Image (cartoon, rainbow, N blue to C red):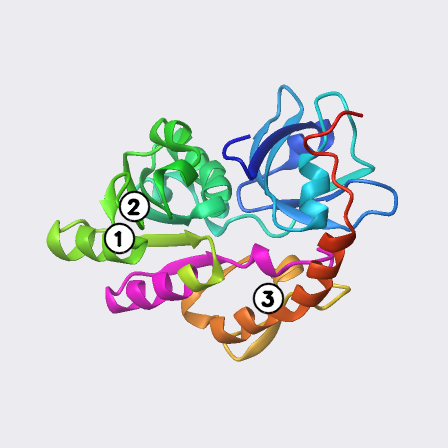
Amino acid sequence: MLTPTICRMKVKAPRLAAAALPGQFLIVRATEKGERIPLTISDYDKEAGTVTIVTQQIGASSSEIISFEAGEAFADVVGPLGIPSDFTEMPEDELRKKRFIFIAGGVGTAPVYPQVKWLHERGVAVDVIVGAKTKDLVIYKEEMEAVCDNLYLCTDDGSAGFKGLVTAMLEKLVNEEGQKYDQAVAIGPMIMMKFATLTAKKLGLPIIVSLNTLMVDGTGMCGACRVTVAGKTRFACVEGPEFNGYDVDFDEAMRRQGMYKAEEVEANEHHNCRIGRGK
């Protein structure tokens, strides 16, 4: 448990680990009758044949996932799915000429990690801004420090690092400290990515965002992840999850996120969670 409600798991899945790339996701089904839950791959070890997932306890299905213990097995784990991050296709000599800034919000820090790690292993300059409500909700701090050039912590209450929003930190780095970046990537709550995009646009900084939080079935069949990008309807799970932030209709995406709240409340009321009790 990284926090009381955020769990990190290593899952033995050799073929998945062998094929995984930064930016991709997998789908977990806890039980035979369980819901399909798309989760971003937070790390992978090709030699050990494992992938890492980070799950925040929000509803009935995430509670079920977190309740699993070492040695148990999910009914299904499918992946890797989605299109890998664009930079994985770039020639490494060209990539090393660029400087990246990643903006991570809350649990979004977990999917940022494998991207930063991949770039670091190839000698690319990477800075990271991590935002959380309070220091107790900051995750992956030590892991991120090991793979980035500079880590900037932001907390709403000032209990760790900079007191304020990640967007304020980005403006401070560029406008006050004179830092120059070629590419920004933002992963986290939809509202954070919206304002990170507005801030990046004001700074003239290209930005990529990940719409993984919109996905439901992960294969393009359910249509829950439909989003307007550059005036066209796109499916985040099969055409993303990463898109040019300037092109995303964030207001529509946030409305779509709220479509299943009533069903989730009902599921929670009937959920018999195993956390905290013997089996």
Q: Amino acid at mark 3?
A: Gln
Report whether 63 appears left or right of 172: right
- Tag 3's secondary structure? helix
Residue 231 position within the rendered picture, expressed as x and y whole percent measured from the top left: 52, 80
Instruction: Specify whether 55 is left or right of 136.
Output: right
Region of the chain picked out in magenta, as a range: 193-219
- Whether residue 195 is visible here, answered yes or no, is yes
Q: Nearer the viewer, residue 271 or 27?
A: 271
Image quarter where the N terminus lies is top right
Q: Is residue 98 visible?
A: no
Which residue is disc 2 drawn over? Answer: 154
Which of 107/59 is in front? Answer: 59
Residue type pointed to by label 1: Gly
**Disc 1 packing (10 Å; few <14; some 14–19; many ≥20):** some
Is residue 131 a member of the stretch shown in magenta? no
Q: Is residue 193 above or below residue 105?
A: below
Q: Which residue is mark 3?
A: 257
| Picture residue at 44% right of the left edge, 47% below the top | 106
**Marks 2 and 1, Cα distance to the nearest angstrom?**
6 Å
Dot 2 surroundings within 10 Å: few (below 14), some, or many (20 or more)?
Answer: many
* Distance from the alpha carbon under mark 3 to that under mark 2: 25 Å
Split into 4 quadrants, where in the image is the C terminus? Answer: top right
Helix, strand or loop at mark 1: loop
Q: Earlier in the sequence, mark 1 or mark 3?
A: 1
**CB of mark 2 within 8 Å of CB of mark 1?**
yes
Q: Quadrant of residue 5?
A: top right
Q: Which residue is mark 1?
A: 164
